[in-house]
Amino acid sequence: MARFILGRLIGGIVILWLVSVLAFVLFFVIPKALGNNPAVLFAGRSPDPATIAGVTKKLGLDRSYVDQYWNFLRGVFAGRHFDSGSDRSWCPAPCLGYSFRNDQPVWSQIVDALPVTASLSFGAAVLFLVVGVSTGVFSAVRRGGLFDRIAAAVSLAGVSLPVYFTGLLLLLLVSYKWHIIDNVHYVNFTHNPALWAWNLIPAWLVLSLLYTANYQRLTRASMIETLGEDYVRTARAKGLRERTVIGKHALRPALTPIVTIFGLDLGVLFGGAILTEHTFGFRGLGAISIDAVNTQDLPVTMGVTLFAAFFIILANVLVDVTYAIIDPRVRPS
Amino acid sequence: MTGPAPAGTPFLQVRDLTVSFRTDDGVVHAVDRLSFSVERGRTLGIVGESGSGKSVTSLAIMGLHRRGRRVSIDGEIRLDGEDLVTAPAERVRGLRGQRMAMIFQDPLSSMHPQFTVGEQIVEAYRVHNRVSRAAARRRATELLELVGIPEPARRLDDYPHQFSGGMRQRAMIAMAVSCNPELLIADEPTTALDVTVQAQILDLMRELQKEFNSAIIIITHDLGVVAEISDDILVMYAGQAMEHGGVEEVFAHAEHPYTWGLLQSITRLDRQLETTLRTIPGSPPSLINVPPGCPFHPRCTYRELAGPAASTVRPPLAEASPGHRVACHLPVDERRRLLREEVTPTL
Amino acid sequence: MSDNLAKDLASPAAGEGAMPTPPADAPATGAVPAATADAGALRDRPAGGGDELVRVTDLTKLFPVRRGTLVRRGAGAVRAVDGVSFAIDRGTTLGLVGESGSGKSTAGRLISRLLEPTSGSVVFDGQDISHLSSRQLRPLRRDIQMIFQDPYSSLNPRHTIGAIVAAPMRIQKQVPRRGVRDRVRELLELVGLNPEHYNRYPNEFSGGQRQRIGIARALATRPKLIIADEPVSALDVSIRAQIINLLDGLRTEFGLTYLFIAHDLSMVRHLSDRVAVMYLGQIIELADRTDLFSGALHPYTHALLSAVPIPDPTSHRRRERIRLHDEVPSPLNPPVACRFHPRCWKAQEICRTEAPPLLERAPGHQVACHFPEKRDVV
């Protein structure tokens, strides 16, 4: 098992490395080849040639691509110097460079934004997983019943309503009309846990509504399939209580596809729930990446991209491992 | 374990069992007024083709049909005198796995792929016995040993997919007999197995019966298997009983044209080769539109001899000789003459 | 290519008129009955090939087993078929029996070239087809057809049975477009289906009828060889006999050659002229039907025959019981030397050290055993 996990981790690292190469080519090699010197972007509006030359030297853009990539990698693991001749600065590891726009280290921007995104995603994930799976199971067991039919209707609404509609509607109600939460904003967990949760509730609800609907439908379909399996009949033939038959024998295999989807969804969410963050005005990874793309802030874009990729790959590795725990047949012997 | 059975009281008595399913296409009459009984220490073989109602019957005895708007069950199923049709579901659940147990056709799909064989046996034992996990584990080891699995203590922690086909069916049997059931129902227990393994499993079932003196129902389409293992045979067609009696009597003096058809249409190693096999014309009826009268009459070679009643009146399952019952409109003498003159020479 | 046969097959009447049919239970010998040798299929008879339609020599198929996720390492191979040799004469049926893991289905797929052999050769009608490309195999596909076990999954549920039966003809362009429909009707009638049901879908038919559709499809291209892989295992008892009779009748009617793959020994006995018993990828005994079923020489064949339940409750008192312990070992790691030795009650030292070759012990009766012994176990 340990070997299996190790193998998956190494595989994940290799993929992450490939992503970093790809991102580097995408953000630094291709623009230059097309005549967009990143140094010009960095130097701001109508820069003079001397500034451009300085920036080029500071960012090391005058070196070979291999050197540039190597410096980037070294920055991530060991930190690096940025030296324009006149101006010399040390960027400690993990160094993803400086923002072109505000000169802040990319890493610190990500570190600032991460708790916001993490709080949002994690809370929503717990909510949609618990609600989605449990209603899905209930729908499957009472297939065709009243609950099932109501759940199907709610599900359909949940999937079809966009976040910026439900989000704004909810904000309008709780904040502007009923004044339950005035001025929804992100509060640090360490600062005040109660206020943290209180302010996040509307965003959690909105974000999870979409996912709950998906998980409800997925769980229902998956449960209906396993409830028809021979081993479920065997479980009943043993005289097990219906609770045990459903909660243990049918649910466990039904969860297998859900774990897969959940892992991927979580990875994507940690990369930034762009619409939700935007709707509620939270400065998470999603908001940062939108700004970075809009302002052509290459280091930030690349940093956020790598970071999102890291989470998705990590989630994939976790899915594989969980899969092996749930289903002994994929476990290496 | 219960003591030796009191003579003459069948442990399982099924009377006028009727099971029907409501579907979008109409009502499926899966089992129609079926009656039979099984005593402790005896084996009943139920033979029939797909749609004959043999599996539906076994699931009905086990209470595994989920009753409701779609399924209706009527008649009596008496287990040691207690009617299971009218008993509360919770009561029947308590009997399942305890006094009656079941093994299924495909041991790979019938065992849970995500729990070890040991966990599954322990669970089956502990649901009906208040014992510690460790005691149940000891019991599971004994059971695996009993069914002939080598190194039982080690194999307990294996998953079903790590077992071979025959070993899996042995493990299924171990699970089923964990609480010493007095009734064991085996639904096509060897159909998914190789022929040499089938022989091993049938031997095992015989041995277990000797040891536990339980009543066994074996459901199969294979007349060879019935002949090997059963004391009695029940031939079913379209949800109804066609012929019922001692296995030697029925194989030697079958009286129902459907049984004749089955015996004639099989290839068998113990007979001279024939140029062409005799067949039963047509195919089994839809259970939504079961033919009126004798359900077999549209395929029956001798329906003319039975007169108009064949297509209007359902023949009762009547005693033809002691312990041998046949549901056929043909007069007994006529059946015996046909058997003697036309059927036996072709077998 | 097979215009003569085409004519013969075109209508059942022509087929019947063309040749007297040999009785199915006539003990088959190596020679093909004269009647079937008349069939048009013999037009391009190979120069030195005698009456053989198929010759398989040292046929081997390995399925590599790989482990590891990122770097795939070979972890051995399943020797599914391992050095199998036999021939099938025109107009005869070879039965291939064995338990799971014996490689009998793989052997069928190799001969039909659904799979490519790892080594060894398959010579069909004088042509080595072992390594033909899929383009080169095209014309061969009409000569070799397969019938599969599961009549439910081997028919496309979205096509009418007319389209299903016509498909091989359209692909092979043997029949002019306008003639296809008539031909399909003929075929449906031939296999005992109502030709008016041309436009129905597979789900409107019962299992036995679906298998008839599969047979009609197989016959559509006027094949020389039909490989039937467990064609009746999924069917009900009363339907099995109908299909067996149909296959039997078609054989005598059109002089077809069958490779009949099945685990049911009594069925194989009924339909085959010669029978090969396979165990873990190898043929351990090959003989004419009568020799095999009443005078088998290999202990595994004895055990196999002894295990078949006989539908006669009094028989077990008379029958000899041979019970094998354990099950067939994994073909990934088969026992060395004689593969049967760990389960064999006659095994001696030599069985553990030396693989017995498949030797002819009596005319036409080959067996791979160090201690062959004639024994009647049925």
Image: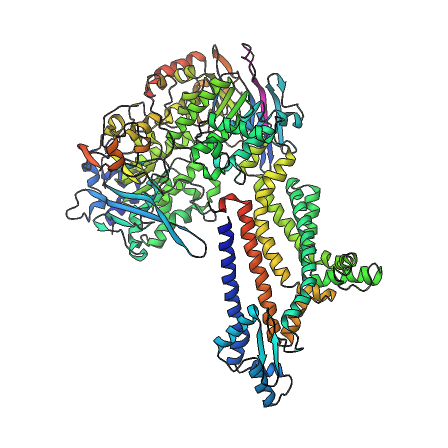
- Asked which quadrant contains residue B163, the reply is top left
**Image: B229 above or below C228:** above
Report if residue C274 is visible in the image: no
| Residue C245 picture quarter | top left
Residue B141 image offset from top left, x and y in percent: 50, 29
Which one is in front, C188 or A192? A192
Q: Is residue A186 above or below residue C182?
A: below
Q: How is the image coloured?
A: rainbow
The magenta-colored residue range is B1-19
Q: Position of residue C353 (x, y in %)?
A: 25, 37
Q: Residue furthest right?
A: A178
Is residue C220 toward the left or the right of residue A310 in the image? left
Residue C302 picture location, percent across and down? 29, 27
In the picture, measured across the screen, residue A102 lies left or right of residue C328, that is right
Is residue B189 part of the magenta span, yes or no? Answer: no
- Give the image location of residue A175, x and y in percent: 81, 62
Point 55% across, 22% down: residue: B181
Query: Considering only vertical position in the picture, is A83 above or below A331?
Result: below
Is A318 in front, or is B172? A318
Quadrant of the frame with the C terminus of chain C: top left
Name the side, left or right, on which B229 lies relative to C34: right
Residue C143 visible, this angle: yes
Task: Tell me: B295 left or right of C296.
Answer: right
The stretch drawn in magenta includes residue B8: yes
Q: How many labels does the image show?
A: 0
Question: Looking at the image, which is closer to me, B226 or C179?
Answer: B226
Q: Nearer the viewer, residue C163 or A25?
A: A25
Asked if residue A271 is positioned above or below residue B278 in the image, the reply reads below
